[in-house]
Amino acid sequence: MRKSTADMLAGAAFLAVALAFWVQLDAEEGISRIFPLGLITFITVGGIWFIAKGFWRRTREGLGDANASRTGWKRVGIITAASVTYALLVPTLGFFASTGSFLFVTLFVLSNQELSLSSRGLRALLFAVLFCLAIWAGFVKMLNVPTPQGLLF
Amino acid sequence: MRMFRLMSLFMVAMTLTMTVGLARAADYPSKQINMIMAFSAGGSSDVQARLMEKYWNKYANQRWTFIYKTGAGGALGFAEIARAKPDGYTIGGLNMPHIVLQKLGQNAQFDPQKSFAYICQVVNDPQCIAVKKDSPFKTMKELVDYAKANPGKVTVGMSGKLSGHGLMFLDFKKKYPDVKFADVYYKGAAEQNVALLGGEVMVIFGNLNDVMRATDQMRVLGMASEKRNAFLPDVATLREQGYDIVSDIRRCFAAPAGIGAAELKYLRDTFRKICNDPEYLADMKKAGQPAEYLDGPDFEAYVKSQYGKAQKALEEAGMLKK
Amino acid sequence: MHEFLLPAFLNLLQPLNIFLMIAGLAGGIVVGALPGLTATMGVALMVPVTFSMDPMNGLVMLGAIYVGAIYGGANSAILICTPGTPSSVATTFDGWPLCQAGRADEGLYTSLLSSSFGGIVGSFFLLFLAAPLAEGALNFGASENFWLCLFGLSTIAVMSADNMGKGLVSGAVGMLVSTVGLDPNSGAPRFTFGIYEMVQGVAVIPCMIGLFSFSQVLFLIGSERQHIADYRPRKGTFGKIFSYLLTKCKTVLLRSSIMGTLIGILPGAGGEIASIICYNESKRWDKDPSRYGKGCIEGVASSESANNAVIGGSMIPMLTLGIPGSAVAAVLMGALLAHGLQPGFKIFTATGELTYTFIASQFAVNLLMIPVGFVLCKCMARLLNLELNMVAIGIVVLAYIGAYAISNSMLDLWMVVLFGVVGFFGVMVGWDAGAMALGVILGPMIEENLGSCLQLAQATDGGLQTVLAGGFINKILIGALVLSLLTPFLLKWKKARAKASEDDHA
C-alpha cells in the first residue's frame, strides 16, 4: 500500500468512528458528555489531518514508493468469513458441533492444494476431532470453563 | 371412526403429559440446577452462594452448576434469570435495590415486580456512615452540626449514583434539607475505602460488609438499619440517634416467574432449611456475611414497597429513565 | 514476624504443598499460555476447588496458579504473537521479532528468568514492606490516579515515536470505545447503538483478544507461510541468557520489577498497565531506543519482570487493607473470605502462620517456576513445528472460548471478530493497536477519576485547580507527564547531536 493511501484510509477510518459516536451523543450531559465529546473532537481533527497529509504526500511520492508486503487476500477473506459463520452457528448448532465443522471446513479449504483431496479431508477430520476432544476434556471436564449452549451438543 | 381415533389419541396424550408433569414435580429436582450469578466468581455474592451450595448438597441430591453472567452492575445476569425457562432448573441470585434501580434508571430488561418468583432473602447488609479513626467527628450529631455550619464542605464518598448509597443520599437530602453534604462517587467499595482512609473524603456511606473489615482504621457513626447488627453491636442505629434513615443492600435468590408451584415450594422449603442451619450461620459469620432470612412472599412485598419509594425518589432527582 | 517465618518455611516442605505448588504452576502456565484464558479466570475457576481443602493448601495452590498464569502468557506472546494474558501485551513487541528471527529460545528463557526475578522482588516487598507501602497507596486519590493514567497514556508517545500522531489518535479511539456501556457517573446507559446488550460495555479482555489474537490469525493466514517461524534451538542458550540478564540487564530488571510492584499496589492498575509502562520506560532510558521492537532482550525482560512483580504488589493492599490491587487479587480475597480469613493488619498476627506460609510460598513458587517453566516452554516451542493453518484456526476457537467464558455473553464473541478486523486493517493503515488497547484500559479510569475530582472540587476552596494540582504527588506526576511528552523531541535532539558529533569526527 502506498503511504499516502494508508494515511488517507487511516484518516477516513478515524472520521467514521468519530461520526458513529457523535450521532449517539445526544442524550448525555455533564462530564458524561464532555469526556466523549472531547475525544470525538480530537479524533475528528486527527482524521482530517491525516487525510490532508495523505493528499499532500500523494503530490510528492512516486508510484514506486509502495511498500510491498504480500498478503493472501483470498485466504484472509476465507478465514474471516469462516469465523463469522462460526460465531453465527454457535447459538443454533451448539458449541462443539459448530467448532468441529469450523475446524474441519476451514482446514480443508486452507490446506496445501498439492495434497490429494482425500488426504486433505482425512487430515482435517482428524484435526477437528482431536481438537474438539482436547477442548472438551481440558476445558469442560477439567477446568469447568463455560462454553456456549446451543440446540445440539 | 377417525374422529374417535383422534379423540383417543388426544386423551392418551393428555394423560401422558399430565403424569409426566406430576412425576416431574414429584421427583424435582431430577437434574443439576443452573445457578446464575450476576457478579464475578470470588466476589462477595459468589462467596455467599458457594457457602449456600455446601448446605444445599446436604439437603438436596442434585448439585448446582454456577453460570457467571456478569456485567453492567449485575443487570445482564438478572435479565438472564428473568428470561430463563421457568422449569425450576434455572435459578439465580438477585440484589436489592439494584434490580429496582436498574429497571427505573437504566431500562433494564426485566421488571422486579413481575419477572421473578422470589425464593427467599439470605443477606441484609445495612449501610453505615463511617469516618476515619482520627476524624474530629465522634458522633452523628457532631457531623450533622458541622455540615449545617459549613454547607457543601463535608464530602461524602459513595459507590455509584444509581446504587443503594445513592438512594440513601437522596433520602437523607430530602429528610434533612438543611444538612448539605457534597456527594462524590467512586467505582466501588475498594476505591471508596481508599478515598476515606487517604483523607480525600471525610465521610463514607458504606456497606457494613466492607466497613467492618477496616474497623481498626474507621469509626462507624451510625448504622442505617432498624436494629443493631451482631457484627458491630456497639454501633447505634441512625434511628436511635434521631435520624430516620433505613437503607440496606439485600441479597436474595429467585426463579423466573411462571415456575410451577410445587417446584417453588420445594426451593423455598430447602432454602429455609439451609438458612436455619446453625452450621451455615456460623460459616456466614466467619465469612463476614450479615445473614438475615426473609421468606419469599415477604421479600416480594418488600420489593414492591421499595419500588414505589425508589420511583418517587428518582423522579424527584430527575434520574428516571423513560 | 520472625516467630512465624520458620514454621512457615517448614509448612512449605510438606509434600502436599510442594505437589500443589508444582501442579498449580503447571496448570497456571498452560491456562496463561492459552490465548483467551486469563490469570483471573484460572484462579477464579480453582477457588471452589479449594473449599474442600485446608485453607493453607488452598491458598498456596491459588498463589501458584496466579504466578504461573502471568508468566505463561509470555509463551504465546513470543511464539505466536498473541498475548496469553493481557499482562503480556508488551512482551509481543520484542518477543515476536525474536521468534521470527529464529531466536525463540532466547525470548522464552528471558521471559522465564525475568518473570521469576520480578516475582521474587514483588514477594520481597510483600514480606518486608507491606505495611508502609499500603499506607503510601492510600495517598493515591482521584487526582493522583487521574495523572497517573494520563502518564500511562503519554507513554504512547514513546511507544510509537515515529508514528506519534496516529498513535495518539488511536489511543483516543480506544478511550472513546471504552465509554460504551453504563456511564460511570450517572449509571445510565450510553453509546449502545440501539443494542441493549451493549450496556455491558466493551470489556477489556475480548477487545484485547480481538486486537492482538484474532488480528494475528488474519495476519498469519494471509502470510501464506507453511510454519510460523523457524526454530533453531542452540545449546548453551539458557546459560548465555542467564549471564546476560545478570550483567547487562540488571538495571532494566530491577527498575521494571520495582515499578511493577508499585503499580501493582495501586487498586485499579494491574499487570496490563505495568508491563506497558515498564517497557516504555526501559526504551526511554536506553542508550539506543531504536533497538526496541526489533527483538531486543531488554524489552522482553522489562515487560515480563514487571507483570510478575505486580503479583506481590497487588497482594499488599489486599492483605493489609482488604483492597485488592488487581482483578486476580480480588478473586484471591474472595477465597480468603470464604475460608474465614479477614484481611487487615491483623492478618499478620492473628493468623500469622497461615499468612506467612502464603507469602513464603510465593518465594518458593517463583523459584520452582524456573524448572517447571523450562520443561513446559520447551514443549510449547514445538508449536512452531506445527502447520501454520492448524495453529491459526485453533487460536480462533480458543479466542472464542476465552471471550465467551468471561461473562457468558455471545456479544463478546462478536467483539473479538470486530476488533480483530479493526486490528488487522488498522495496523495496515498505521493505527496503533497497542495504543488503542491502552486507551480501552485507561479510558474508564480517567473518566471516573476526573468525575470524582469535579465532584470534590465543589467542596474544596480553590476548586478544580487545587484538587488537581495541589499536593506533592500530583506535582511529581505532572512533572513526569510533561517530561514524558517531551521525550520524542529530546530523542530527536539527542540523535541530531550524535549525528553532528559523528560528522565532526569524519
Image: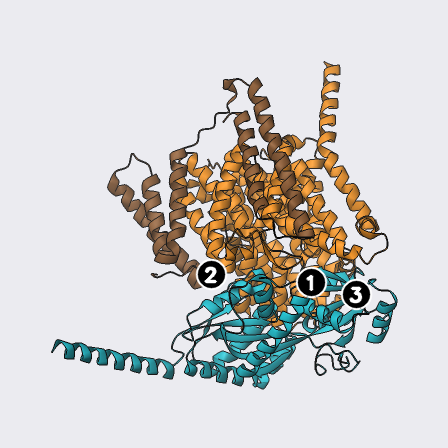
Give the residue drawn at x 58%, y 29%.
Answer: A51
Give the residue drawn at x 72%, y 23%.
Answer: C496
Check contact, mark 2 vs mark 3: CB within 8 A: no
Query: Of the numbered discs in the image, which one, if any, rests on residue A145?
Result: 2
Pointer 1 residue: B190
Q: Amino acid at mark 2?
A: Val
Q: Position of residue C446 (x, y in %)?
A: 68, 50
Tags 2 and 1 both on a single chain: no
Which quadrant of the figure contains the C terminus of chain C? top right
Pointer 3 residue: B181
As helix, strand or loop, the secondary structure at mark 1 comes to: helix
Subunit bearing disc 3: B
How far apart are the two marked residues, 1 and 3, measured between alpha carbons? 21 Å
Q: Is residue C392 visible?
A: yes
Query: Which of the chains is brown?
Result: A
Indicate whether B27 appears above or below B194.
below
Query: Which of the chains is orange?
Result: C
Indicate whether C252 appears above or below C312.
above
Chain B palette colour: cyan
Give the residue drawn at x 51%, y 41%.
Answer: C422
Which quadrant of the figure contains the N terminus of chain C? bottom right
